[in-house]
Image: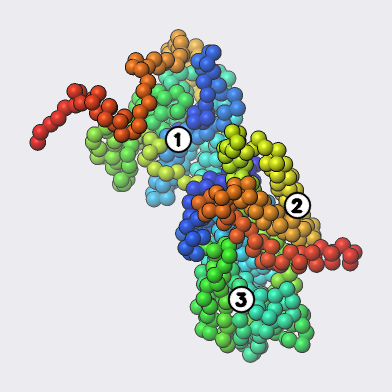
Amino acid sequence: MKNELLVKMVEEFALNVVKPRAREIDETESFPLDTVKEMAKYGLMGLPFSTEFNGVGADTKAYIDTIRIISKYCATTGTILSAHTSLCSHPINQYGTVPQKEKYLTKLNTGEYLGAFGLTEAGAGTDASRQQTKAVDCGDYYEITGSKIFITNAGYADVYIIFAMTNAELGLKGISAFIIEKDLKGFTIGPKEKKMGIRGSSTCELIFDKVQIPKTQLLGKVGEGFKIAMTTLDGGRIGIAAQAQGIAESAFEKAVSYVKTRTQFGKPIAAFQHTQFVIADLKTQIEAGRLLLYKAVEDKDNNLSYTESAAMAKLFCSRLAVEVADSAIQLMGGYGYIRDYEVERYLRDAKITEIYEGTSEVQRMVIAGKVLRS
Amino acid sequence: MNIIVLVKQVPDTTEIKIDKETNTLIRVGIPNIINPDDLAGVEEALKLKSLYGGTVTTITMGPLQAESMIRELYARGIDDAYLLSDKRFAGSDTWATSKILSTFIKTLEYDLIIAGYQAIDGDTAQVGPQIAEFLNIPQVTHLKQIKKIEGNQIFLDKAYEHETQTLSVELPLLVTTLKAMNTPRYMDAFHIWTAFDKEVKIIKFDDLDIDPRYIGLAGSPTRVKKTYTKQVVPKSPKEVLEPKDAAKKIFKLIYPYMEVKSQ
């Protein structure tokens, strides 16, 4: 009941607030700060967290429905919300101390703060053990030096979850996680990357030059960083799968309405069997994506392990988004290729879902690992 | 500031079709919505609450299915809701409905009652004013804007066709609101998540101190003899012209009737 009402609300919100801005923010590569503020006003920035810390207290399903629906109208906005919730608020909620939750989670949940996450480095992508960013223990404080790249929400975020080596000799077990505020001395943001898709979102380098942070900013225990990063990404992947699923659903709806009205050889192109077969295949794939996505959601809401189901959902739904967007363009021909009809944006936006928060190859490693190691 | 808002669940008339045989509305499968003029009233009440504090209570008369609408009102931030629902209320016209609602409202404490100007299914615009009469309180219909409340005085603008009246009225007062006066907020996630934990208080005939002769179909003075759709018969032949030629032709036709005023 609650979930259905939330879906109804998010549909209305996305249609009236998110959709009208989608094309413009893509064209101008501008960050939709106004939309973020509106999402905050309606409680969408703190859905799956406890009311004790100003959250809504909703379940994963509510959060994932929201990402999916918002991404149907604007994948950029989906990215911003997903990075904020899954990658920043979530690890603080799971690993943070009560004072850390009171200081950060309460403001992240109301949207007063926007969150971000920094793991990737120029030389350390999938292989996180190659982290060059260092956090040196200086007694009362840590001193962080290094840089992170491709950071979503960079420049607009108030709080960043950053991973750095506290003991390089220990490899993955030498990584620790930190909560870092913007405006710290020595912390600067690089220029905005120019991207293929989700162009309204902000993606920048983070540069740390001897940034001093109190020891209370350590998230979890020393050396626990890699574990925190991996479990955070498990949850994040359900969000990306939802984003991809939303793009696929939207592209499909556009294609269906087009083939019903486009007339060639005296009849709507929906009357041709080729069109019908393409539509049938796409619909079947979309339904499969939905089932995989909500299987992962169910696992998480039922406190079961969701590493594997989240990886499968992301692997499948991200490919689905690319393929459905591509098919939609093909069905719509020249109209699909021009920007007015939006499906070309869907294809550009879809591609990132196969790359960020673990490439499709990483998802296969995760799935195979689960299958073969058990 | 205790505000009562009268809210009705109505069929979404934008989706309604007419049965050509019987000339009546086909109601089967039509989604129900919050009456738009009433939703404007809810928004106005929530705005007043944020400015002056107090509570917002909605009152609805209708079948039990109206509960779904009330959950959506909770999801927008109202504090309390009553649903007046009884088989004996069925068939009430606007007079009997106003009688039932005002009888119940007399048991509550309130400063302001907001009613939608009219419901999109009946279009009578009678229930609000009749309730004010039954309660013997002042009323201002066609509310344009509430300017401020100072103590017992409310300052507001009332819309007329070609003018706006600024009035100062003593509370308690009943006002009627129109859809165009504001943009209702969306439901919000915080209130959605608690909307189903709240109580929808059901009020039955037995809960009211009311004479059964004044309610339901039997207590309603209105008698509907026939409902029909007006047939439009074109009086002049249809012509299809290019826009430019059409404009010229229209001008020629209406020119003799135009009043040209010289300054």
- The chain to which mark 1 is attached is B
**Is B8 displayed left or right of B193 in the figure?**
left
The answer to which of A214 and B256 lies nearer the viewer is B256
**Which quadrant would the N terminus of chain B be assigned to in this image?**
top left
Residue position for label 1 = B36
Give the CA distance from mark 3 to mark 1.
50 Å
Mark drawn on residue A292? 2
- Badge 3 marks a residue whose secondary structure is strand
Q: Chain of mark 2?
A: A
Image x and y of residue A319, in percent: 71, 57
Q: Which residue is mark 3?
A: A149
Q: Residue at x 61, y 51 (%)?
A: A329
Pinpoint residue B141: horizontal percent, then vertical percent. Answer: 33, 32
Label 2 with label 3: CB-CB less than 8 Å: no
> Are tags 2 and 1 found on a single chain?
no
Is residue A301 visible in the rendered structure shown here? no
What amino acid type is highlighted by mark number 1? Pro
The one of A233 and A201 positioned closer to us in this rendering = A201
Secondary structure beneath disc 1?
A: helix
2 or 1: mark nearer the eye: 2
Classify residue A158 as left or right of residue A120.
left
Query: Do tags 2 and 3 sit on the same chain?
Result: yes
Amino acid identity at mark 2: Leu
Which quarter of the image is occupied by the C terminus of chain B? top left
Image position, residue A65 (x, y; %): 64, 50
At 64% across and 37% down in the image, what residue appears? A270
Specify the subunit that label 3 lies on: A
